[in-house]
Amino acid sequence: MPTYRLTLEYEGTRYRGWQEQKNARTVAGELRRALEARIGARVELGGAGRTDAGVHALEQVAHLRTAAALRDLEELAAEVNESLPADVHLLDLSPAPERFHARHQAILRSYLYQVCRRRTALGKRFVWWVRRPLDAPAMASAAAQLAGRHDFAAFCERAEEQTSTLVVVERAEVGESGDLVLVRIAASHFLWKMVRRLVGALVAVGAGELDGAGLVDLLAGRTGGGRFRPAEATAPPSGLFLERVIYEGDPPLAPLAPALPVAAARAPRRPASRPPAGGRPARTRPGRR
């Protein structure tokens, strides 16, 4: 059966995640409806990762299989986008090998998290506003310790239901851009809520509530984290993006950069000083009414 590779972006705010559910609105459900309406036939659809409710994607990858003959893929992609909600967009639709599987053949998945140091009116749905002062270099030093093979049971929801909680993290880095502190974690796969709990731990390090040694103890299953509980510090989904899904032959990850920038805030202006009581009132120029 002909197979196609789809790449899409979406804002996850209004959805219960990627995976199709009977009684909930999901990204895959919207995509399936748009595809089948335009193709006129049933399709098999599978995604590279099951992003949770409220999580966004810059480049989610999916495979599409259908018995229908698809000729002009560029025109079909444009038609599908006309049928999709405004917060889901198909970036690319291209032929793939017949056995291509978006989830099984992915060799690396990269997640980006945006922590914001200030209140933002425009970026609220895409950041986690942390009001405490954050030491980004301390967070970067702690993040470097996440690379390698570790047991992430302490950072997983329902760890007892997992076949294994061992994950090899290929890359973990922290950077700054404007008023954002960016966290990128890349691995072959992730456990449920693993990224958000790791971000919560790194923020605790940046706020001075957890040190690097405590983070290592948590990875080793020890209690060196003291009273810190990863589940209680889970970062909200609003700041999380599925950044890239990489397959054999794909280009490497680009340098760390924000998904949606938040410029550094200007210092507020001080109000003009008022004249002392009994002093001269300020002179004003006559103007038109």
Image: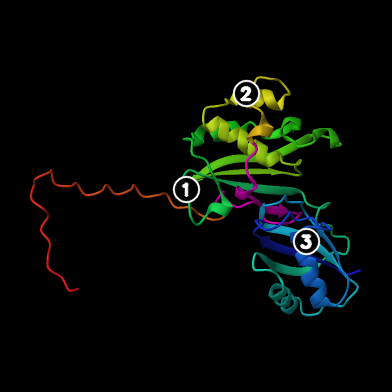
Q: Nearer the viewer, residue 190 or 278?
A: 278
Q: Which residue is mark 3?
A: 28
Q: Is residue 20 left or right of residue 210?
A: right
Q: Nearer the viewer, residue 54 or 102?
A: 54
**Where is residue 250 shown, x and y percent of the image?**
71, 57
Q: Is residue 258 visible?
A: no
Callout 1 amino acid: Arg
Q: CA distance from mark 2 to mark 1?
A: 30 Å
Q: Residue at x 73, y 54 (%)?
A: 16
**Where is residue 115 shown, x and y percent of the image?**
54, 44
Membership of 239 in magenta stretch:
yes
Task: Give the label, 2 or 3, closer to the camera.
Answer: 3
Q: Is residue 200 left or right of residue 154?
A: left
Mark 2 or 1 closer to N-term? 1
Q: CA distance from mark 3 to mark 1?
A: 32 Å
Mark 2 or 3 closer to N-term? 3
Q: Which residue is mark 2?
A: 214
Q: Residue at x 50, y 34 (%)?
A: 137
The crowding category of the residue bearing disc 2, from other C-alpha atoms within 10 Å (few below 14, some 14 to 19, many at least 20), is many
Membership of 282 in magenta stretch:
no
Q: Which residue is mark 1?
A: 119
**Where is residue 130 shown, x and y percent of the image?**
52, 40
Give the extent of the magenta segment: 234-258
